[in-house]
Image (cartoon, rainbow, N blue to C red):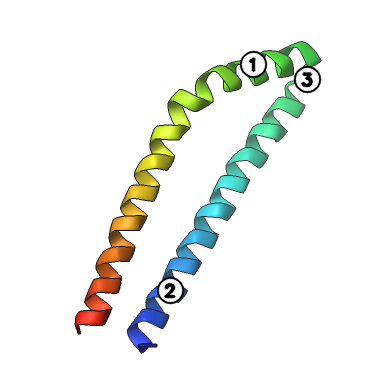
Amino acid sequence: MSMGLIVFLIILFIITMLLTFYAFKIEESKMKHYKDAGDTVENELKRSLEYEATSVKKYIPIQIWMYVITTILSIALIVYYFLK
């Protein structure tokens, strides 16, 4: 394997881990806010139903774009690696 490819994969892994920890921190702060506000079961159910109704419309297009970009970049890197 090329040293450049190894470095790229390590950097990609670090970026992925940082973004994952960032997402965990955001969710953790939301949970703390709800706990401090004295959230009720009814509010939790309401939020859950709202999330169910809107998540497909909101997150599926984002995931599709993420997969498209990742696939294109992967193919480009593979072509570059083999043509080099």
Secondary structure under badge 3? loop
* Nearer to the camera, 74 or 39: 74
Secondary structure under badge 1? helix
Image depth: mark 1 or mark 3 in front: 1
Secondary structure under badge 2? helix
The residue labelled by disc 3 is 38
Residue 22 percent across, percent down from the top left: 55, 50
Q: Amino acid at mark 3?
A: Gly
In the shown orientation, is residue 41 left or right of residue 20?
Answer: right
In the shown orientation, is residue 76 left or right of residue 13?
Answer: left
* Nearer to the camera, 37 or 17: 17
In the shown orientation, is residue 6 left or right of residue 84?
Answer: right
* Nearer to the camera, 16 or 83: 83
First in residue order: circle 1 vs circle 3: 3
Residue 4 percent across, percent down from the top left: 33, 83
The residue labelled by disc 1 is 49
Q: Residues within 10 Å of mark 2 (few under 14, many from 20)?
A: few
Give the residue at x 40% y 80%.
7
- Alpha carbon separation for disc pair 1 and 3: 19 Å
Give the residue at x 43% y 41%.
63
The residue labelled by disc 2 is 9
Is residue 37 shown above or below 68?
Answer: above
